[in-house]
Amino acid sequence: DVKVTQSSRYLVKRTGEKVFLECVQDMDHENMFWYRQDPGLGLRLIYFSYDVKMKEKGDIPEGYSVSREKKERFSLILESASTNQTSMYLCASSPTPTGGYNEQFFGPGTRLTVL
Amino acid sequence: AQKVTQAQTEISVVEKEDVTLDCVYETRDTTYYLFWYKQPPSGELVFLIRRNSFDEQNEISGRYSWNFQKSTSSFNFTITASQVVDSAVYFCALLTSGTYKYIFGTGTRLKVLA
């Protein structure tokens, strides 16, 4: 089974702190994604990566950065956390499509609260 | 522009009732893929089904069925004889060919009452 794990289920940070959210997948997927989920807004894409050291901005990249030094790991960084970044963060991965497009596999999510 | 609309924010049904979750999508591409995911209270989205734009056949999997109609740009999901374990948030998503960007709807929260 594909497994996507996220470093924390719940996280509480202070305004201005630097926050790292880690995501690891064990199925050798090329593509990895970070979303945030807020009530009434669904899932919004923050960043995605289609290869090691490659990244592309999603719909809401402001205030976030990412790092992908190894294929299995994709980190989301909040350089200076703010209260409006309180949210559920979901990581996902998917293989590069061959003959069709594939579903994403999601981690359990990290609920981040910024005080 | 590409968009997915799930107009039903929340639905409540009594166990054993049938329920349909609506999904309407917008895209100008002729090749695209549609997905349904389930998010139970544990939080992890679980893949349910994928459909490509060239395959309009409806699909049935146990109590779940999906109705894909290109004429109305809809990909609706029906649960027959709902159970309490079906309580979750359900997301519909669109992916167009040549991109890695999945477009998600805002989700429909389904509550099945015993």
Image (cartoon, coloured by chain):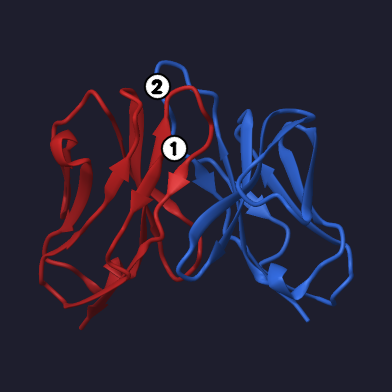
Front-most of B58 and A36? A36
Residue A55: where, in percent of width, then height? 72, 34
Quarter-wise, where is residue B50 in the image? top left
Q: Position of residue B16 (x, y in %)?
A: 11, 72
Which image quadrant: the N terminus of chain B?
top left
Colour for chain B in the figure: red
Q: Chain A hue? A: blue
- B108 shown above or below B93: below
Q: How busy is the neighbourhood of tag 1: few (under 14 within 10 Å), some, or many (20 plus)?
A: many
Asked if residue B85 lies left or right of residue A69, the reply is left
Seen at 35% across and 42% down, the residue is: B35
The residue indicated by pointer 1 is A103
Cβ atoms under marks 1 and 2 closer than 8 Å: no
Residue A100: which disc? Answer: 2
The reply to whether label 1 and label 2 mark residues of one chain is yes
Q: Secondary structure at mark 2?
A: loop
**Disc 1 secondary structure class:** loop
Task: Specify the farthest residue to the top.
Answer: A99
Subunit under mark 1: A
Left or right of residue B15, residue A21 in this image: right
**Residue A109 in picture, x, y percent from top left:** 60, 61
What residue is shown at x 20% (from left), y 50% (from top)?
B76
Mark 1: which amino acid? Glu
- Subunit that carries the residue with mark 2: A
